[in-house]
């Protein structure tokens, strides 16, 4: 009820109705605490924490899975080398999240639920959280079997499942056969992707440039392009069997 | 009272009392006026505005709160209660974790057998271990949900930008806390999950022996960030000790300090965000 009335409260300003924390908030917290502790206790009585055989460095389980909350990142390892999936991506996630308040300058939707006043922000965050983080975790927990191959829940986890290695690098798929040529081609594709994406965004938002500021808009679009780049790479791999886009002597993307 | 003959309960009257809720105040009166109650508590609590304020202001734990709060901040629909539950789960892991520490030794030869001992011989050992583990897992979920609701309500917008930054550090430390704890049972699950996780450090650009540009820095399997983290080139007893110290001392202290700042900033930023 209060929700429907919320946006209208603007006119009233900060002087909205104030209530005593004791008893109104304290009793709510108390109730929440009791429910949480009861739930935790029941859960702990009913389900035992796992304890497998003693650690054995000579016996590698297949599949070896990271703790469930990191399985999204482990899944990205299929599409990217460890330096990106395991190091650069987590750092970018942490830094990117920290930057959110400084990049999102939309003054609307501060302190209440709204979709219409900040559609893009909600879409981008929900996509990153629900799809790239949560959905990949669910996939990692339930669908990844031996050799990190994909198994449907009703399929037998066959450790000898044969998966053809048909992936090629993007430059190769486009007929570039020399090593240096492929390196140039790949670099052009990656840099071109960022340049074109940035250009389009700046052109579309040219009116906002003055009020938002160059650095803000630049960081915003680069972070967004990186996030979408991960999705594009996943699609390229699953749909077109592309292994790397850019191969260099130092790193591959 | 004694002189009165016992009253025969009048059903209609009783139903009226139940319906109007008067029955509760009657029972409360019966209890608080009994000899046991009056001899235990020297005076009652008068529900006056002054006392309501004093309950918060003169209680060391409760005065984390302001004494008054906007009505909308009470709505569970608004906060989902997730920040508070995350904090409670953190406290639960602190309590159960300290109990586990009395029985657990972070030594390659002992760790696994201490877990078995905890499970089969220590009174309530299994329960303590379960509560510790499940509270830790639940905390990971609730902190994500808390973050999601803070995003959806736009509560990171001015003046709360900095508290969001603190929050991102908190979610990171929550994950690290969980991850370092994952190794301690010293079973197959623990060792290999942490092997998979820490193998990533090998690929750190410049600082990991398999990372891009490592050759310019001279990182080797025995001398890179991963070796620093696990005290060797494989997850062995030195890694167990390192993770134990990080898990029981370093990370909880840092996370605790960050939580103090987090709560302080909520109040300095004007309490829970709301429509202005
Ligand atoms: C250990 C982790 C954390 C604890 C114990 C915690 C605790 C709390 C509590 C108790 C509140 C009061 C309101 C509520 O319950 O929703 C709160 C508010 C807030 N939290 Fe957290 N939090 C944690 C992590 C985070 C994270 C990961 C973020 C975001 C990245 C965050 C950002 C905020 C912000 C911006 C507020 C103010 C919300 C408002 O004014 O509406 N916190 N936190």
Image (cartoon, coloured by chain):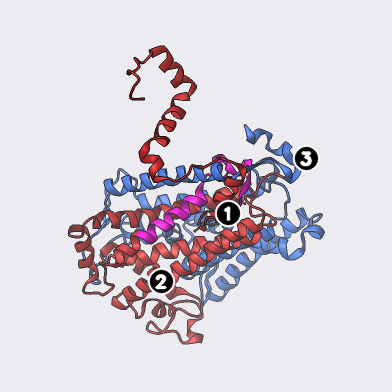
* Position of B148 relative to A252 (above/below): above
Q: Secondary structure at mark 3?
A: helix
Near-viewer residue (B142 or A240):
B142
**Residue A50 in sight:** yes
User: Would you say the residues marked 3 and 2 are in contact, meaning their CB atoms lie under 8 Å apart?
Assistant: no
The dot on residue B57 is 1
**Is residue A81 left or right of B113 when viewed as pictured?**
right
Circle nearer the viewer, 3 or 1: 1
Write down the chain letter for disc 2: B
- Mark number for residue A11? 3
**Residue depicted at x 36% and y 80%:** B231
Nearer to us of marks 1 and 2 is 1
Q: Is residue A168 visible?
A: no
Q: Position of residue A172 (x, y in %)?
A: 51, 65
Q: CA distance from mark 1 to mark 2?
A: 31 Å
Q: Colour of chain A?
A: blue
Q: Position of residue A252 (x, y in %)?
A: 51, 70
Judged from the image, the quadrant occupied by ligand 1 is bottom right
Residue at disc 1, CB closer than 8 Å to ligand 1: no
* Alpha-carbon span between mark 3 and mark 1: 31 Å
Q: Which numbered circle lies on residue B10? A: none
Q: Which mark is residue B249?
A: 2
Q: Is residue B211 left or right of residue A13?
A: left
Which chain is the one coloured red? B
Labels 1 and 2 within one chain: yes
The chain containing the residue under callout 1 comes to B
Observer-nearest residue: B63 or B182?
A: B63
């Amino acid at each position: 009820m209060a929700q429907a009335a919320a946006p209208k409260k603007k006119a009233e300003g900060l002087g909205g109705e104030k209530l005593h924390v004791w008893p109104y908030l304290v009793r709510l917290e108390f109730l929440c605490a009791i429910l949480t502790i009861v739930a935790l206790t029941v859960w702990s009585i009913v389900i035992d924490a796992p304890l497998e055989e003693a650690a054995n460095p000579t016996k590698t389980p297949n599949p070896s899975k990271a703790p469930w909350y990191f399985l999204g990142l482990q899944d990205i390892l299929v599409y990217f080398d460890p330096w990106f999936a395991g190091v650069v991506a987590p750092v970018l996630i942490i830094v990117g999240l920290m930057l959110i308040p400084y990049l999102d300058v939309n003054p609307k939707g501060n302190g209440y639920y709204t979709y219409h006043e900040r559609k893009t922000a909600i879409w981008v965050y929900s996509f990153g959280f629900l799809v790239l983080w949560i959905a990949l975790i669910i996939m990692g927990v339930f669908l990844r079997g031996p050799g990190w191959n994909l198994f449907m829940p009703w399929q037998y986890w066959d450790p000898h499942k044969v998966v053809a290695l048909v992936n090629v690098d993007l430059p190769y798929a486009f007929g570039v056969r020399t090593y240096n040529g492929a390196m140039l081609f790949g670099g052009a594709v990656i840099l071109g992707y960022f340049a074109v994406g940035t250009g389009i965004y700046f052109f579309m938002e040219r009116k906002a440039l003055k009020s938002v500021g160059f650095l803000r808009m630049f960081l915003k679009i680069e972070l967004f392009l990186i996030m979408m780049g991960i999705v594009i790479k996943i699609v390229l791999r699953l749909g077109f069997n592309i292994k790397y886009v850019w191969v260099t002597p130092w790193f591959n993307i | 009272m004694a002189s009165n003959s016992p009253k025969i309960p009048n059903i209609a009257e009783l139903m009226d009392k139940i319906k109007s809720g008067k029955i509760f105040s009657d029972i409360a009166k019966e209890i608080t006026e009994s000899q046991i109650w009056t001899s235990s508590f020297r005076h009652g609590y008068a529900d006056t505005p002054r006392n309501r304020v004093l309950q918060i202001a003169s209680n060391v734990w409760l005065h984390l709160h302001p004494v008054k709060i906007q009505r909308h901040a009470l709505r569970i629909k608004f906060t989902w209660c997730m920040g508070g539950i995350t904090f409670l789960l953190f406290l639960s892991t602190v309590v159960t974790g300290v109990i586990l520490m009395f029985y657990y030794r972070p030594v390659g030869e002992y760790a696994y057998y201490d877990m078995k001992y905890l499970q089969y011989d220590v009174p309530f050992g299994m329960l303590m271990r379960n509560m510790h583990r499940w509270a830790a897992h639940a905390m990971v979920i609730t902190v994500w949900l808390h973050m999601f609701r803070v995003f959806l309500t736009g509560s990171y917008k001015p003046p709360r930008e900095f508290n969001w930054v603190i929050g991102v550090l908190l979610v990171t430390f929550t994950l690290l806390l969980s991850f370092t704890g994952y190794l301690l049972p010293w079973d197959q699950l623990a060792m290999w999950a942490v092997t998979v996780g820490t193998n990533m450090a090998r690929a750190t650009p410049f600082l990991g022996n398999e990372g891009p540009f490592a050759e310019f820095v001279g990182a080797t399997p025995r001398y890179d960030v991963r070796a620093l983290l696990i005290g060797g080139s494989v997850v062995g007893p030195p890694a167990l000790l390192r993770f134990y110290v990080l898990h029981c001392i370093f990370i909880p202290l840092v996370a605790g300090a960050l939580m103090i700042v987090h709560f302080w900033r909520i109040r300095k930023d004007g309490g829970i965000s709301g429509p202005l």
